[in-house]
Amino acid sequence: MSELLSGRRILVVEDEMLILMMVEGILEDLGCRSVTSAATVKKAVSLIESEFFDAATLDMNLGGDDSSSVADALSKSGVPFIFCTGNDRPDMREGFRDHIVLNKPFRDADLTTALTQLLS
């Protein structure tokens, strides 16, 4: 359990079911109050516009769709987020180059460290 993550509401934007289940498990073990997931750009943007999140993890590619509009929605809503990607060299858009990037596959400790850094 992480004191910094305990009670937090986290949005996980991920289209790979096994990765999603892994991330949800890690976040629950860290004491997050709620973990909400979205597998598409449309669902993610809808959730961001209708709910409150303390932080988010964002896959850079959702079923072949670029997740830039999700990154824009998170930024507009003031939700800090980290990128997750399976790409060797993530193509970062202007304005998002300073965001933390977790390369898949990552370990529990990597996600914990990234979120702790993001929220501290």
Image: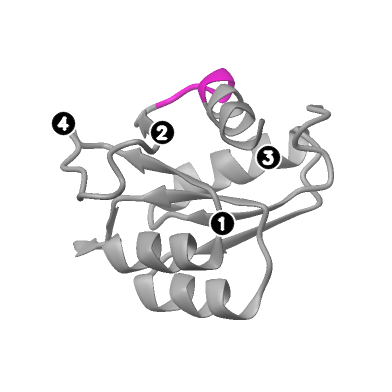
How far apart are the alpha carbons under marks 3 and 1? 17 Å
Which residue: 39% across, 78% down?
A: 42
Q: Which residue is mark 2?
A: 100
Query: Which of label 4 and label 3 is nearer to you?
Result: 4
Q: Earlier in the sequence, mark 2 or mark 3?
A: 3
Which numbered disc flags the more N-terminal residue, 2 or 4?
4
Give, as a single range, the part of the protein colored magenta: 106-110
Q: Closest to the observer: 57 or 27?
A: 57
Residue named by callout 3:
27
Q: Amino acid at mark 1?
A: Val
Amino acid type for the residue under numbered disc 3:
Leu
What amino acid is labelled 2 in the image?
A: Ile
Give percent across and percent down for residue 64. 19, 62
Q: Are marks 3 and 1 in contact (CB under 8 Å)?
A: no
Q: Position of residue 12 (x, y in %)?
A: 53, 54
Which secondary structure, mark 4? Answer: loop
Left-right relation of 2 to 41: right
Where is mark 4, residue-wise?
89
Q: Judge whether 9 appears above or below 106 on screen.
A: below
